[in-house]
Image (cartoon, grey):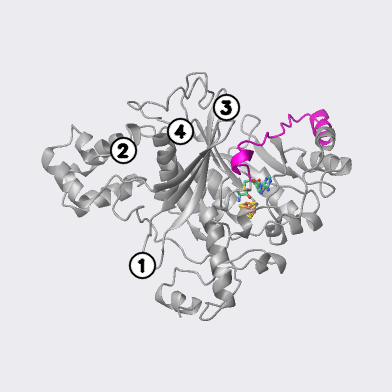
């Protein structure tokens, strides 16, 4: 029986714990990750897709490309992989035959496997993506990624972790037991998978009639124009790989997404906010959800570590903050919990002086959740108070509800099945019964 301690001994980077739903019940702030992916590992072991420039350079050096050629070769591969979406080294016509053969012998351009695709009535697509094992201790992992087409934009909602170590009481992802960080390559690969699926490459064709059916932006613009880190996981607990992935996604010679169109959402990991602003220079969203510490402690337990005052101070200090670059404050509408007029007024008071947008999110219920969504009239009244105070307060229309693709609902079906199997195993013999809770930072 491999206990948690065994794992820790074999790999000091692999964190301790099997995670328990009881962590939430017991009021823990966070669960510790079961396993970290091996830093810098490519998805699929030898696939070059998703790698940073430095990682590509190392991969080329490893097959004997001479130092003086490296820069030029990286530029060539970069163009083929990230600008054109090449799936085969044979397409790389400006790379010599000999090198192409060497590349093909050592590496692939494989994407992580799409286990399932669901298309909602409203055009939203959800992919369950299987990330291959990144090392001997990792069996691979499944994550979800959602694409939301709108008239003037296409937004891809990406995951930064498998599951989440935090235990926000209204969020389905927080109940997922298996947790590990995604590598930067795995984060980038989500964008590649999405662009493959919707034909968003220079020479690719979108699915039949996609634009006419409203599955793609109708203004003729780029399909995936915006990225939000609002899928599974807390991005600031995986900040190094999130920043590396953003660098790849926004590179002007490859995927070319504007940093202003990339939003990182955090539950409030205060010590990492400054670094995100300074190094990634993206837009920031804060999952606020409550205006009093007592309630936020319960809804977003990381508040017990970094309270509302510390969080808002970090927001005021966020690099690059201005009226043109506002912070989005997300506020989930929970019936009878955080949706009173007094809450709305306090919200406005708290945000005074911070260039802000307020995003009201109707709560998306999931099986077993203990909250209800506020009534529509209540949301309107709340929104009215916020609006009168000078904030545009769009209520985020839930998208893809029929395929459980809306905020906070992401938790892979396979994981659910596996959790059931594990529960059964735990009740039987030989189950791994070592649970601990630690500090996941
Ligand atoms: N971990 C990060 C990003 C992922 S969650 C964070 O918490 O910010 C993305 C957003 O969805 C967050 O604002 C989160 O609070 C919200 N969310 C989670 N569960 C939800 C639910 N059931 N209904 C509506 N919004 C939810
Ligand atoms: Fe994690 Fe965000 Fe869900 Fe909280 S709301 S459990 S931080 S994914």
From the viewer's side, name the closer residue of 110 and 401: 401
Q: Residues within 10 Å of mark 4 (few under 14, many from 20)?
A: many
Residue 192 percent across, percent down from the top left: 40, 39
Query: Residue 393 colored magenta?
Result: yes
Work out whether 22 lies above or below 160: below
For the residues labelled 4 and 3, say whether their Cβ atoms are less than 8 Å apart: no
Q: Which residue has dot 1 on it?
A: 136
Per the image, label 2 sits on a secondary structure element best described as helix
Residue 89 percent across, percent down from the top left: 22, 40
Mark 4 vs mark 2: give the one in front. 2
Work out whether mark 4 precedes mark 2 in sequence or the reverse, and give the earlier one: 2
Q: Residue at x 32, y 50 (%)?
A: 55
Residue 310 percent across, percent down from the top left: 71, 53
Q: Which of the 4 quarters of the picture holds residue 321?
A: top right
Work out whether 403 lies above or below 140: above
Q: Which residues are magenta?
A: 382-407
Q: Which residue has dot 2 on it?
A: 81
């Amino acid at each position: 029986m491999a206990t948690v301690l065994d794992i820790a001994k074999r790999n000091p980077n692999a964190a301790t714990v099997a995670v328990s739903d009881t962590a939430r019940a017991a009021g823990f702030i966070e669960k510790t990750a079961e396993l970290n992916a091996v830093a810098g590992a490519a998805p699929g072991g030898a696939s070059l897709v998703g790698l940073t420039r430095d990682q590509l350079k190392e991969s080329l050096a490893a097959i004997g490309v001479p130092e003086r050629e490296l820069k030029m070769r990286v530029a060539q591969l970069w163009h083929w992989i990230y600008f054109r979406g090449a799936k085969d080294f044979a397409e790389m016509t400006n790379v010599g035959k000999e090198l192409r053969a060497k590349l093909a012998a050592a590496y692939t351009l494989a994407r992580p496997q799409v286990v399932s695709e669901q298309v909602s009535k409203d055009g939203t697509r959800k992919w369950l993506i299987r990330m291959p094992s990144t090392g001997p201790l990792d069996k691979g992992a499944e994550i979800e990624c959602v694409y939301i087409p709108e008239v003037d934009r296409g937004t891809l909602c990406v995951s930064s972790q498998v599951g989440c170590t935090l235990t926000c009481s209204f969020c389905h992802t927080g109940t997922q037991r298996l947790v590990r960080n995604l590598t930067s390559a795995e984060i980038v690969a989500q964008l590649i998978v999405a662009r493959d699926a919707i034909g968003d490459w220079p020479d690719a064709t979108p699915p039949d009639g996609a634009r006419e059916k409203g599955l793609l932006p109708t203004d003729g613009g780029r399909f995936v124009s915006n990225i939000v880190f609002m899928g599974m996981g807390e991005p600031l607990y995986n900040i190094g790989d999130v920043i590396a992935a953003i660098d790849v996604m926004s590179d002007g010679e490859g995927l070319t997404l504007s940093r202003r169109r990339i939003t990182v959402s955090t539950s409030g990991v205060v010590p990492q906010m400054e670094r995100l602003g300074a190094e990634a220079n993206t837009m920031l969203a804060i999952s606020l959800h409550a205006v009093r510490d007592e309630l936020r402690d319960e809804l977003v337990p990381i508040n017990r570590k970094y309270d509302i005052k510390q969080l808002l101070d970090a927001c005021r200090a966020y690099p690059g903050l201005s009226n043109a670059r506002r912070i989005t404050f997300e506020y989930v509408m929970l019936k009878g919990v955080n949706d009173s007029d007094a809450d709305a007024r306090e919200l406005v008071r708290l945000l005074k002086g911070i260039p802000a947008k307020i995003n009201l999110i109707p709560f998306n219920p999931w099986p077993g959740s203990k909250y209800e969504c506020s009534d529509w009239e209540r949301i309107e009244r709340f929104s009215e108070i916020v609006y009168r105070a000078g904030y545009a307060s769009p209520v985020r229309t839930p998208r893809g509800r029929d395929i459980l693709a809306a905020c906070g609902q992401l938790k892979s079906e396979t994981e659910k099945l596996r959790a059931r199997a594990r529960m059964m195993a735990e009740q039987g013999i030989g189950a791994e019964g070592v649970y601990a809770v630690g500090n996941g930072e």
